[in-house]
Amino acid sequence: MTARIGVVTFPGTLDDRDSQRAVRVAGAEAVPLWHRDKDLKQVDAVVLPGGFSYGDYLRAGAISRFSPVMESVIEQARAGMPVLGICNGFQVLTEAHLLPGAMLRNTALHFVCRDQRLRVESTATDWTADFTPGQEISVPLKNIDGRYTADERTLDELEAEGRVAFRYASGGPARDGYGNPNGSQRDIAGITNAAGNVVGLMPHPEHAVEPLIGTGRTDGLGLFTSVLKKLVSA
Ligand SMILES: NC(=O)CC[C@H](N)C(=O)O
């Protein structure tokens, strides 16, 4: 049976169509979910895509967190359903306290848009099992509130528990996408919850799944194929 992956659209969401497409390219059925719906239509997993949900008013993700759809997503995520938050979706996940920490304005105080090199740090999550630890990938990044921040204790805990899923890669020139683009603490680009079913990351894997588009890289596809394997084996 084909796995069903829900993709949430909030008012102001930008990347729901690309996320749906990525889900389909990976081999699953994409199920559109609307922010006002509590009914998750029996999906097996949920993607919270990027954009400016509710216009990023108050703080990115601060209003979306209280939407009817999030009530159900929070409940299901706590029960073990795989949830991926991309960029604005990651901001929503921190606001919803499904992931620790918060996103501050980039240190340079402006919007950054570029291809970004990442190192996969943990493959022990529902969304990263198809990668190899230490693998470098390149996917687009585009945000203004991307500076991941948490208190030292939380950061130490994330590191000790292997919950840093992606880090901004160093070791090459900025023009090739290396380096920390937004001042995130400890170069953190993505994290997971303790159970490994909820993952948030700032860069956009859904924009790098087809060889004919953009840089021609398909480095982002691994997140979507990873969750499929998990769902099929469940
Ligand atoms: N691409 C996005 O999802 C943008 C996220 C967010 N609203 C920001 O600018 O930080």
Image (spheres, grey):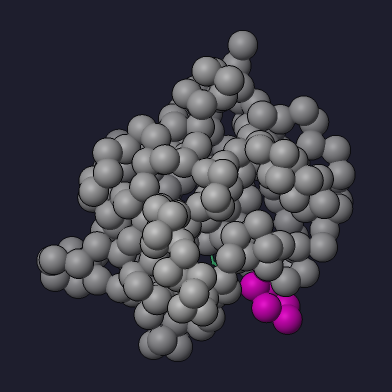
Q: Nearer the viewer, residue 216 or 146?
A: 146
Where in the image, quadrant-wise, is ligand 1 located?
Answer: bottom right
Q: Nearer the viewer, residue 110 or 168?
A: 168
Q: Is residue 128 left or right of residue 228?
A: left
Q: Main secondary structure of the magenta part?
A: loop
Report the residue at 44% width, 55% height from top: 161
The location of residue 108, given as percent across then percent down, is 39, 87
The location of residue 13, given as percent across then percent down, is 65, 58
Report the residue at 82% width, 58% height from top: 67
Vertical relation: 172 (above or below) 109: above
Which part of the image, by quadrant, shows the N terminus?
top right
The location of residue 127, given as percent across then percent down, is 47, 40
Report the residue at 31% width, 42% height from top: 219
Q: How many numbered badges does the structure rendering display?
A: 0
- Is residue 40 found inside the magenta-colored segment of the image? no
Image quarter for residue 65?
bottom right
Q: Is residue 49 visible?
A: no
Vertical relation: 173 (above or below) 81: below
Q: Is residue 57 left or right of residue 135?
A: right
Return the residue found at the far top: 1
Image quarter for residue 63?
bottom right
The location of residue 146, given as percent across then percent down, is 48, 73
Vertical relation: 74 (above or below) 109: above
Q: Is residue 117 left or right of residue 199?
A: left
Specify start and end residues of the magenta stretch as a single range.
55-61
Q: Is residue 120 visible?
A: yes
